[in-house]
Structures are given as structure tokens and as C-alpha cells.
Amino acid sequence: MKVITRIPPSPTGNLHIGTARTALFNYLFAKKNGGKIILRSEDTDRERSKKEFEENIIESLNWLGIGYDEFQRQSERGEIYKKYIEKLLKDGSVYEAEEGVIRFKNPNTRIKFTDVVRGDIEFDTSDLENFVIAKNVSEPLYHLAVVVDDHESGITHIIRGEDHISNTPRQILIQEAIGATRPIYAHAPLILAPDRSKLSKRHGATAVIDYQAKGYLPEAMINYLALLGWNPGTDQEIFTMEELIKQFDLNKIQKGGAIFDEKKLAWVNKEHIKRLSPEVQKGMQIKTLKEEHYIKNRPDLDVEKMSWKNFSKEDTKKCLEEVNKLIPDTDAIMKYAERVGKGNVLWPLRYALSGEEKSPDPFTLIAVLGKDESISRVKKAIEIL
RNA sequence: GGCCUCAUCGUCUAGCGGCUAGGACACAGCCUUCUCAAGGCUGGAACCGGGGUCCGAUUCCCCGUGAGGUCACCA
């Protein structure tokens, strides 16, 4: 049996981190099994669906490197749904209610299904009412559209968020009514905000594009997302997409929700940056450096932090005066530093330029600031001394 | 509230009956003449509670408690 999975976002917002993580799991699982993956835009809600969101979702998925084999748009599949709704109407599985919508006739049975990550789950559907499956024959709603699409596309595995567990019995009911085979379910835990509630817009940056804008590497994002709710069972924490595909396993998906921690994302990002070529790293460093407050504005300098170790203020001052004549000649400064003591020269130089105890090296700073600005910053330091 | 799901350091997690409960992030301290937004070392930090089962429970069962999800003509 060929594995077929799906990524079914609703274009009512930018690609959400939670959706991206679920998309990733579907992608990894399909790739690992040599399967197929379908991106399905669930835009049956004409009011809320926006073209721009669909574009954002596609772009974000692209940026992350999550590919797919086929693209579908529910708004273009009206005829297919209509055919099913009419058939259900005819055989009496659904009926038109007084309000004019179409409801599913609840058979009030017990539905039991096996979830790959949670085991057996059982529902008594008599707790459910006769739920609405379409506004009319031409306007299907979520449950109907999903079940029909999954069936028509031959979806074998539905990997989705835990928030869909309670939707499952309804969908199974519809499956049985249209004679569809039941796919295998795997409900992944939710990605949580720091307060342990479902991560949503009110928690700030929740769209993939927000992190793209912050300068995170797509590889880092993928890596971190994969680790939220899944782990390989080893101590490995840094992965490439290829490694993830190779190691991914539905059975190792976590049960409990995981809080999204940007600090750890930042660490993962740093680890991926380290694996980049020195040239690319330098380019990224310079790009992000330009946004630093201490590059945009002259820093306030603290005389006490100006000297390295026990080197005197007077000597530090002399060093800086010498160095200032050499800027921006890197080799000359380095040669001088080796003679006088690297720390004695490089620390105060870097501090004079950035005003930070931790910052990139002085030569990078000179490159970013430019000759004139560098010289005047060092001059300022000399004055204070 | 009904139904469903979940429960190991602050966070992400390993553990699948016997471990000094491991790793990572974060945090704290120390080291490092500085091309250091680095690296290294050390440290503090967890099995929600109560019953069982068992020679023995973090691990299996039950009950609590807590957290979350879901109850739309949204998806």
C-alpha cells in the first residue's frame, strides 16, 4: 500500500507554527515511506478564506522546504461534494432540516478507533446531535468536505493535531455512510504557549513568516519543530531534513503538549549557523549586526570596562592611540596586538567600538562601521581614558 | 458543565518493573590575552497525590487532583 498523506490548512491566516509542525510530520512520514503528499487548501468558508493567506501558506511551506506532490483547492471541487451529498440525501443518511441545511442522521452508536500515538479511543456518538454537514448541496462544510477529499485522494494516514480527536467520530460516521475505508489516525500533541494554552495569535509571533522575518534559518525552524512532540530516542538534537526523514517514526510522537520555547529555537538556530560555510556566516553576521542598537547608535562607554585585566588605563590609552592610526588595516592591527599583547589591544578596541562585553570581533565591527565611524568611536574612548 | 486527551527538572525530553532517574535549553558559578553575540568545566533543579498488584514501582491497574482540547450553517 502506497502511503498518501495530506496537509490541509485553511487559508484564514498565515501559516501557523502548529500547522507547520503537523505539515512537517506528514511530510516526513510520507517521504520516509516513499509516499505521496497532498496540499489541500480548505477554503470552503468563502467569508474568511483569503487568497493572500493561501499564498503565504505556500510560500512558508516552500521556505521551510516542505514539498508536496499535488495541490487541491476545495472551492474548486464543488461538483464532487455535490455528488456525495445528493447520494447521501437519497439513501437517507442525511436529511434537509427545517432551517434549510443538511444534517447527518446520527445513528447513535459507539465509535472505536485506534490512534497510532494514543491507542484505542472510544466515543458514544449519542452525545452528538444531528450535526450539519453542508449549508446546501453546493456548499459543503468541513466534516463532509474532509471525508470526501480524504476518500477521493486515497489518504492512508491522517496525521493531525490533538484538537481534532473529538472530530474523528463524526468523520468516521460520514466515512461509513459514503462507504469509505477508514484511514490510520495519528493525533499529535498541541504546541502550547507559555501559559499552556493552545498557541494562538494573542500569544504574539505564531506564524512561520514571523520567524523568517526574525532571521531564523528554515533548517533551524524545521529542526526545532520536529523536536516539539517527537524525538528520535537518542541524544541527537541537531538534524538535517534528510536525517529527520530517515529517523522519523510515528510511534515516537509524544502524547503531552509541548510549550514553544524561542530560547531553544535560538540555540538550534545557532547550531545550524555554525554548520554553514565561514563566508555565509560572515554575511549573515554583518546583515544582522547592522540592526544592533550599538551599531546604529554610539554606545555609552564605561571607563572601568575599557582595560583588559590588569592593564593600566594609561597603557590602554596609548594602545588605542596607536591602533587608531592603523584602522582599518587589519593585518597591521593584528601585528601590533601580537607585540603588545592581544588582549591588551583587542579587548579595548572591541569594547570601544561596541560598548558591549560580548560582541563580534573588532575587525568585523570595523568592517560594518566603516573607517571614519570606527576612528571616531576609538577617539571617544581615548578621551574618556 | 458533558465528552475526550494528557501528566518525569522552569522548558523540550530519555526511561517501557530493580537506574546514584540520563541528555539538551535556560539559569548560577568558575576558567579562558579576546578574530568572544565563542568555547570549556562545575552546580542547583523533576517522577502531581492516594490506594492497590508485585519480593520490588517513575514504569502496570483504580480513584482523586491538575492541565489542555472539544462541544458552530469555522476548520
Image (cartoon, coloured by chain):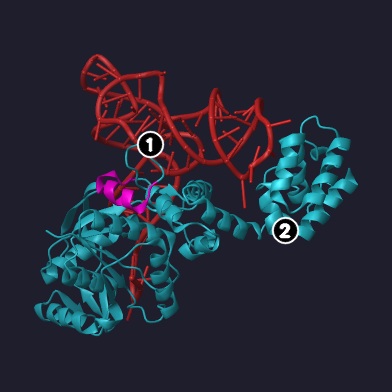
Is residue A241 magenta-colored? yes
Q: Residue A220: where, in percent of width, then height? A: 45, 53
Residue at x 72%, y 41% (from the top left corner):
A335
Q: Residue A151: where, in percent of width, then height? A: 17, 69
Secondary structure under badge 1?
Answer: loop
The colour of chain A is: cyan
Is residue A74 magenta-colored? no
Report the number of numbered marks.
Answer: 2
Residue under mark 2: which chain is it in? A
Relative to B74, is A93 on the left or the right? left
Q: How crowded is mark 2: few (under 14 residues within 10 Å), some or many (20 or more)?
A: some
Q: What residue type is labelled 2?
A: Leu
Relative to B70, is A155 on the left or the right? left
**Quarter of the image where the C terminus of chain A is located:** top right
Residue at x 68%, y 56% (from the top left corner):
A367
Q: Residue A281: where, in percent of width, then height? A: 54, 53
Secondary structure under badge 2?
Answer: helix
* Residue located beneath label 2 in the image: A369
Q: Nearer the viewer, residue A272 or A376?
A: A376
Residue A273 visible from this viewpoint: yes
Q: Which chain is red?
A: B
Q: How far apart are marks 1 and 2 (CA)?
A: 41 Å
Q: Which amino acid does label 1 sit on?
A: Asp
* Residue located beneath label 1 in the image: A235
Residue under mark 1: which chain is it in? A
Q: Nearer the viewer, residue A124 or A90?
A: A90
State if disc 2 and disc 1 touch (CB < 8 Å): no
Eyeballing the image, is A235 above or below A73? above
Relative to A239, is A294 on the left or the right? right
Q: Give the range drawn in magenta.
A: A239-255
